[in-house]
Amino acid sequence: MEQFTFTDKHKKVSFGLIGVGLLAVLYGIFTGQGERTWVSAMINGWYFFSIGLAATFFIAVNMASQAGWFVVFKRLFEALNMFLPVGSIMLIIVFIGATFHWTHMYHWMDSELMDPHSEHFDYIIANKEPYLNLSFWWLRIILLLGVWNLFAFLFRKRSIVEDEEAQPKKWFKKNITLSALFLVFFGYTIHIGSWDWIMSIDTHWFSTLFGWYIFAGVWITGMTVAIIMTLWLKSKGHLKEINSSHIHDMGKWVFGISFLWTYLWFSQFMLIWYSNIPEEVTYFIARIEDYKFTFWTMVLINFIFPMLLLMSKTTKRNPGVLIFVGIVILFGHWLDSYFLFTPGVLKDQGTIGVVEIGMLLGYAGVFLFVVLSQLAKAPLMVKEHALLEESLHHHIN
């Protein structure tokens, strides 16, 4: 079976990017920009963690729905989903920093805000203490990350064992059950994660659509990375089993989820802006007034580019167009991640400079190292799967 080789060149590129990231961290620390560095760690930690989470989710969706076309992509998504443990560590580092007050990203952790006798007492935050308290918060972190990583590990392990045992029907049925369990758990917990790790930064603000909005951003980022990596591997002579129809289907997913993200973003924005309730609209006022150009650029990039360039069947099958649109989308959703955290922590002092770009490259280096090394640990194409033949002969007009 075809095997991907994790070469010294790949390692040098990964380590070079990691080196850039470390220099950016040192620059941030020694220039007295510690809080900015912590925020950037959360932006990029969440961004790359979400790619692994999206891959785990998409594996489960396709196994539960018995989708034949997906089988040829399975090993790629497994490599992406195995970034979850490393991505989890990236997030935990920030959570530890917040817990020990090395960063004040989560200001609800300040005990004075909960104390009725303090001049800094905050009535709204105090009323959220039964949910927003460190013990319960960490319990949820351990539960979410632990279970998500467990499913990611099981999806990968079962895929390898399925090839070794050559009993595809047996594992096919077991994987449907496993996938269904994950989807039920994920359907609830992606909202909890979004509330705990992102929305609680703006503690006075809330949105009932926020979890769905975060879910759409996670999904589109993961799918875009997957299609770019697929096209890169094909350009290197790998994944010959993937044909233009497979690429077309992946292009449709990127196109469709981009519209889902836009729909949820607009629904959340429109309802809050129209109602003009102070405790809700303040979230968007902070972003529009202090970051007007980059904020609206993010929205337009994530909507306009997929809509205009991926509308036709031809462009969904064109590697050049898909890679160009994919890179633009990835940048657009990195900006989305930026706006999830920066205004709530740095207020109007946020910027995109050496620290943000350098750490983005550093985290990308870690991501590439982990994913490419995982790709090299198993054949790029499964050999035993109940729907493999259907996938190999997948064709749409």
Image: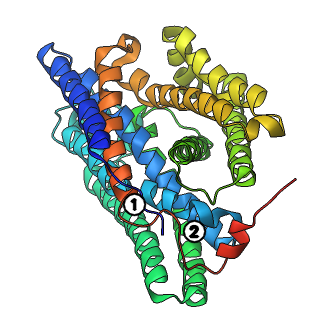
Mark 2 Cα-neighbour bin, 10 Å: few <14, some 14–19, many ≥20: few
> In the figure, is residue 371 to the left or right of 170?
left
Tally the numbered discs: 2
Q: Secondary structure at mark 1?
A: helix
Q: Which residue is mark 2?
A: 184
3D distance between C-alphas at marks 2 and 1:
13 Å
What mark, if any, has residue 144 been given in the picture? 1
Mark 1 Cα-neighbour bin, 10 Å: few <14, some 14–19, many ≥20: some
What residue appears at the point 37 percent right and 59 percent down from the top-left corner?
Answer: 376
Amino acid tagged 1? Leu
Residue 233's spot in the image, x, y percent?
51, 47
Amino acid tagged 2? Val
Quarter where residue 25 is shown: top left
**Vertical order, 374 against 309 (above or below):** below
How does the figure colour the protein chain or chains? rainbow
**Vertical order, 396 against 236 (above or below):** below
Q: Residue furthest left?
A: 30
Residue 20's spot in the image, x, y percent?
24, 25
What residue appears at the point 22 percent right and 44 percent down from the top-left corner?
Answer: 93
Q: Secondary structure at mark 2?
A: helix
Residue 162's spot in the image, x, y percent?
48, 82
Please state which of residues 117 and 259 is positioned toward the viewer in this rendering: 259
> In the figure, is residue 189 to the left or right of 96?
right
Evaluate whether residue 59 shows in this view.
yes
**Vertical order, 284 against 122 (above or below):** above
> In the figure, is residue 15 to the left or right of 255?
left
